[in-house]
Image: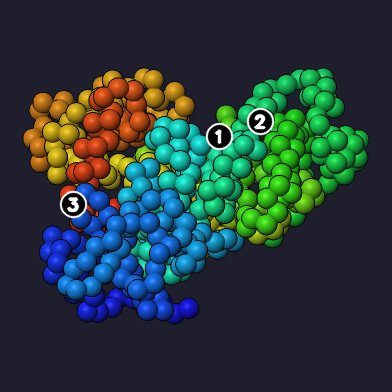
Amino acid sequence: MQHKKNEIGHNPITLFTKGFPDVKVYINSVVNDGGELFFMIREGFESFLIIHSAKTDRYTGRKITTGGLKFVKCPLNHDNAEILREQFPFTKPVLVGKRNSYGLGDRLGNAGPAHLQSIGKTEFVPVLAQQSIRELERTGRTAEDVLDAASWSVFREGYRDGFGADGDHLKTTNDIDLMVKAGFTMFTIDPSEYVANEALGMSEEDLHGNFEKLPWDLLDEHSNEFLDRMVGASFVLEDGFELIPSKREILAGMVKYGRVISHTKKLADYLRDTHSGHPAELELSVDETDQPTTLFEHLLIASELKRLGVELVSLAPRFCGDFEKGIDFKGDLEEFKKEYRQHLAIAEKFGGYKLSIHSGSDKFSVYEAIGSLNAGAVHVKTAGTSYLEALRTVAEANPTLFRQILRFSITRFDEDKKSYHISGRPENIPDLKSLKNTELKNLLDHDDTRQVLHVSYGSVLHGQGEVSVAFKKQLMETLTKNEALYESNLLRHFERHLAPFDS
């Protein structure tokens, strides 16, 4: 099957646009597949797939005739997306493996084209469909919605280099089933409910007691065998760094993470056994803990999972400093670089998986630090920052709507911030009455404003009552009407995210 692109001069498209002069044709989407011509358009506030073919009857849509030619105008719905992925494999997610990758969460479903435009200039593989269960609940979207939006974006941009799809922060087998059914290929396990943060403060007696109570049957080893193997052991990393954990460190580490390891094994086995024919790769997230992940804790998790036959494509430790949502890193960058090198050495020792940076949006100083090391593989996760760039666009193009959304977000802040690690304070946001419309976009460079807007996205997009319904409709219409501005803002913003890794 041959796919030709960019044939904008092809006569059927010329005739189509003459018949519909107000329609925008997305040039990069044009594909001639065995005599069938496909391209995407935007008409008003909606986008469609247009097909010119004498034989196609697979896609659902409305038949139209213009310029003496017949076309099918297809909505970008789930049924058509599934057919698209079958006919054009480049619109289906792939396994990314241990290549450098960038997670590009899209809470609105319209940022994909700009994401691809920015990532296409780099060595990163885009993980274009990335959404957690929490985000699905708060936005009112389905896993299918997220993957479909990614596929349509890939087709619109004519992107052929492959993209990943990450079911983020999965906690249960039901979560896995949901993402497999939708077609996701990357599964990020979140075992945070099984972390015993209190282990570090336990007495020797309590440590021993809790250690013996771990699910050793699931860990496939007796507690005495584990201690015989670990106590007194020396672990030499590739950079020459040596770890010799004390018995207390070993006990505390296992009490803190033993059930994390067994739960991860359980979910990995379930994915492999229940969905054996489904392409899948695993990330483990242990970043949501009370304290930073120590080098020994990382080594313990990695070594035990490897012993149990669980292969990771990436792992997200909790690094030193603060990785708050929507703003830059707070902490000692030199300490971070030193710690990052050592975590990287552990990753290299136990399979060469990527280190994953969660809450990765806007961590520009961290990007520069990692880029300066020029070592190992990395995965970065972003999501909320694309939503904030959408709001920047609204501030420029529809200031009245932006003022309404910000005021509403302030009223929701105390409730919506509960599940986030942030320090933003609404009282530090400048008085809106004192700001001219032309000054509103500058609020998106203000940390407190960014965090208030970031955590309230669910209330704005899928909250209770008519207010949120109106916000979502007006927001999407504003972004569609000002598509060029929106994509320009996203492109500029993500070029800033990506550039430091080239240093």
Q: Is residue 107 above or below residue 496?
A: above
Q: Residue at x 54, y 51 (%)?
A: 184
Q: Is residue 138 left or right of residue 197?
A: left
Residue 314 picture location, percent across and down: 60, 52
Which of the 4 image quadrants contains residue 63?
Answer: bottom left
Nearer the observer, disc 2 or disc 3?
3
Marks 2 & 1, CB-CB < 8 Å contact: yes
Q: Which mark is residue 200?
A: none
> Label 2's element?
loop
**Lower position in the chain sequence, tag 3 or tag 1:** 3
Nearer the observer, disc 3 or disc 1?
3
Residue 262 picture location, percent across and down: 75, 38
Which of 310 and 269 lies nearest the eye of the viewer? 269
What's the CA distance linking mark 2 and mark 3?
50 Å
Residue underneath mark 1: 288
Residue 72 picture location, percent across and down: 30, 63
Residue 103 picture location, percent across and down: 46, 52
What's the CA distance linking mark 2 and mark 1?
9 Å
Q: Which mark is residue 195?
A: 2
Residue type at mark 3 is Gly
**Lower position in the chain sequence, tag 2 or tag 3:** 3
Residue underneath mark 3: 44
Residue type at mark 1 is Glu
Location of the C terminus by quadrant is: bottom left
Which of 6 and 459 lies nearest the eye of the viewer? 6
